[in-house]
Image: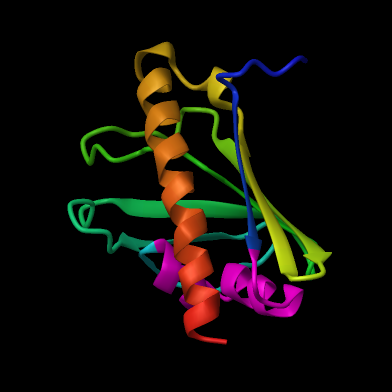
Amino acid sequence: MVESSTDRIEKQIDLQASVSRVWRALTDHLEFGQWFGVNLEKPFEPGERTRGNVTYPGYEHVVMEVTVNEMKPEERFSFYWHPYAVDPDVDYSHEEPTLVEFTLDAIPTGTRLTVIESGFDNIPAARRDEAFRMNEGGWAEQVKNIQKHVIKSP
């Protein structure tokens, strides 16, 4: 299947931190929660689901739930989730989730982090555009958040 420009969000940032430091920030559920803005209930484990309340102002009513797809140490971390699932009165479980992938590459100045979220074309048309737009902006902010986090707390 050829992905459309509306099916995939990709962000990339060069972080002045080691690959192991960035890996820890991504895969330790408590650290992830600090920069991402969520209080996850349990650690990330492949094939397992974890959830928690979002702590970002204005979104405290949102429960984020992810199912870990892959954890290839210091290379790739991925999970499935329902993008922009913010309405407490809507059951998103019947929708196809998107895949969020974090890829780490060592570079001379630290780590190149690539974040890709794909699968938006499978979201119901009624909310697809808004979910894509909100996550496009959200990932732009989140790569800045992880950058601040890994620099602030080595």
Colour scheme of the rendered structure = rainbow
Q: Give the residue at the far left of this rendering.
A: 58
The residue lying at 46 percent from left, 55 percent from top is 142
**Is residue 2 among the parts visible in the rendering?**
yes
* Quadrant housing residue 39: bottom left
Q: Give the residue at the far front of this rendering.
A: 109
57 vs 84, left or right, is left
The residue lying at 39 percent from left, 53 percent from top is 64
The x, y position of residue 114, in whole percent, is 68, 50
From what the image shows, is residue 46 above or below residue 108? Answer: above
The x, y position of residue 38, in whole percent, is 37, 64
The residue lying at 41 percent from left, 73 percent from top is 34
Q: Give the residue at the far bottom of this rendering.
A: 154
From what the image shows, is residue 92 above or below residue 45? Answer: above
The x, y position of residue 103, in whole percent, is 73, 55
Please tell me whether the stretch drawn in magenta is mainly helix, strand or loop.
Answer: helix
Q: Quadrant of the N terminus?
A: top right
> From which residue to which does the magenta span run?
15-36
**Residue 59 belongs to magenta span:** no
From what the image shows, is residue 99 above or below residue 72? Answer: above
